[in-house]
Structure formats: C-alpha cells, structure tokens
Amino acid sequence: MNLKPDDSSIVQLFWERSEKALTVVAEKYGRFCSSIARNILGNPEDTEECVNDTYLAVWNSIPPHRPAVLAPFIGRIARNLALNRYKMNHADKRGGGEFPLVLDELSEVIEGKETADSELYRKELMEVVNAFLAKLPPEKRKIFVCRYFYADSIKDIALRMNMTQNNVAVTLNRLKKQLRQLLLEGDLIS
C-alpha cells in the first residue's frame, strides 16, 4: 500500500530544502491544483503552467511559512496565480472555464456603492463574507467555497457533495440571496 506522506512531513522536506518535497506535493496535490487552475483558466496549457508556477511559489514560501495544513495553503497560491494569469489573458475579453460564470453570479450579489478598488470597501466586504461563511452549516459553507473560491462547476460540486445539480444550484441561489441581504443591511451595496 502506497500511503501519501502527511502535511507536516512534506513541510519538513521543504524546510530541509529537499527537492523530494516538490515530487511529493505534485503527487499529493497536483490534481487539486490542476482543478483550481483549469476552473479559472479553461485552457490546458495555461493550467499546466500555472500548476508548475504553484510548485515554485510553494518552494519559495516554505520557509519562511510553516503551514499546518497544506491543501488551503497550496490552493490559495494556485488560485491567486490562476487569477493573475486570467486577468493577464482576458484584459478585454471573456474566456473559457467556469470563472466567467462565477464572476457573473457574484456580480449579482456584490455590486457596491464604492468602487471595488477601494481598500476599505474590500476589507469591510471580506469581514461580512467571512462572518456569513462562519455562520453557515459546514455543508453549505463547502458548497459556497467550492463554487466561489475554487470556481468548481455545479456538476463537480454535486458529485463531491452527493447531491443533484439542481439542489446545488438552488442552495447557491439561496446563499447568494442571504449574502446579498446581509450586504444590503450592512450598507455595502445599493
């Protein structure tokens, strides 16, 4: 039986600057990173490049960071790199992948009075969204994060959560309405 090393062992490999750390991360988290990048970019070549950039960024981040759980740490790096590449590739156009759909869905909810570039607005918005997520039951929180953080398709979420696609879509719609109401009450959107 081939057991994958635990996260603390992998982090230790990075701290020791062992190149084996990259191989182990690729084996354990490669599909996860690919899924995130593919959902955002919708392009196999860009996805592969983003995943490789993720490994390099993780190598450069550990040390000094010592994450206890690697999946969210690596996932955030992959997501940020994919978003940066998406912005670069689609400055004036919409492209493939799930990301344009996710943006359209969230634009219905998060249209603020201030510009999205306002740092204060972003901070307030993030505080409200984080508080909203903290109050959700774990299953609903996972559905929301899978869709709006990792840009997973509704089909993939339904399979992962053992739900119908319609049930996932209805849940997401209800969560968006709840979040929108919370943002209206907080005077963050008009």
Image: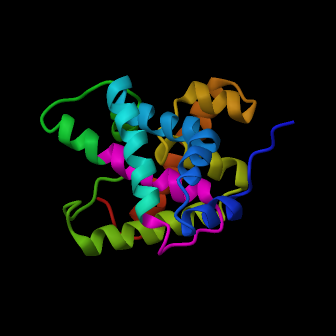
Residue 179, image x and y in percent? Answer: 49, 56
Depicted 37 relative to depicted 24: above or below:
above
Residue 77, image x and y in percent? Answer: 43, 54
Q: Is residue 59 magenta?
A: no
Residues 127 and 69: in front is 69
Query: Image quadrant for the C terminus?
Result: bottom left
Q: Give the magenta range.
A: 61-83
Depicted 131 relative to depicted 93: above or below:
below
Q: Is residue 70 magenta?
A: yes
* Residue placed furthest toward the left: 92
Count of numbered circles on the image: 0
Q: Is residue 13 left or right of residue 75?
A: right
Residue 27 seen from this side: yes
Depicted 116 relative to depicted 38: above or below:
below
Residue 121, image x and y in percent? Answer: 29, 70
Residues 180 and 97: in front is 97
Residue 56, image x and y in percent? Answer: 40, 52
Q: Is residue 33 left or right of residue 122?
A: right
Residues 39 and 55: in front is 55
- Residue pictured at 48% horizontal, 63% vertical: 129
Query: Image quadrant for the N terminus?
Result: top right
